[in-house]
Amino acid sequence: MRKLFITIMAVATAVCTMAQDKKAEFNKKLVAAQTDEMAYRLNMTDAQKREFSGIYEQYCHEVLSAKIAMDAKKKELTDPIAQEKNRLEKQRKVLDIRIAYADRFGKVLSGEQLTRLYKEENQIQKRLKRELKQALNEQKAAKKQKK
């Protein structure tokens, strides 16, 4: 019985590790795609793109980490006021990260490119949310049709 338990735990650990590895790999590919998209949209030179890539990858990692931490905290909250405060704090953390990176981006990008960077980022996020919402609605509709 103990060997069965240990085997089950080992398999469960391996599955969780594989899932985390896949998620990490997906996030890495997503950030690389975002970096390429930003370089294209901002008409960066090759030299700018090389310098920008490392900074932007760090920036994306920090933003993602902050959002994940705040989303995890949100799941624990039941009070609507506390949930709203959490949402606002999440926005503030992302804004703090943006402010912290503005000088670093400013060493690589022009002022106009920096302004466009944040605008483009917002547009991409809005589009992704809209597309995700649409995909979820289509999945729900498909499930209803099957029933």
Image (cartoon, grey):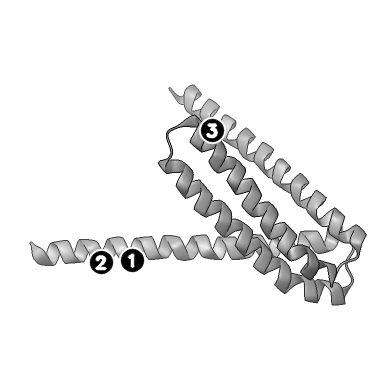
Q: Is residue 136 left or right of residue 37?
A: left
Q: Tell me the distance, in whole angstroms, between the alpha carbons under discs 1 and 2.
A: 6 Å
Name the kind of residue labelled 1 in the image. Answer: Ala
Give percent across and percent down for residue 123: 77, 45
Q: Is residue 39 left or right of residue 110?
A: left
3D distance between C-alphas at marks 1 and 3: 30 Å
**Which of the numbered marks, if any, corresponds to residue 10?**
2
Q: Are marks 1 and 2 in contact (CB under 8 Å)?
A: yes
Q: Is residue 127 above or below residue 95?
A: above
Residue 104 appears in which quarter of the rendering?
A: bottom right
- Residue holding disc 3: 139
Q: Which residue is mark 1?
A: 14
Q: Is residue 84 left or right of residue 3?
A: right
In the rendered image, residue 86, in percent from the top left (x then y), is placed at 54, 42
Sequence-first disc among 1 and 3: 1
Name the side, left or right, on which 1 lies relative to 30. Answer: left
Q: Which mark is residue 67?
A: none
Give the quadrant of residue 19: bottom left
Label 3 sits on what residue type? Gln
| Element class at badge 3 | helix
Q: Is residue 130 above or below residue 125?
A: above
> Marks 3 and 1: in contact by CB < 8 Å?
no
Q: Amino acid at mark 2?
A: Ala
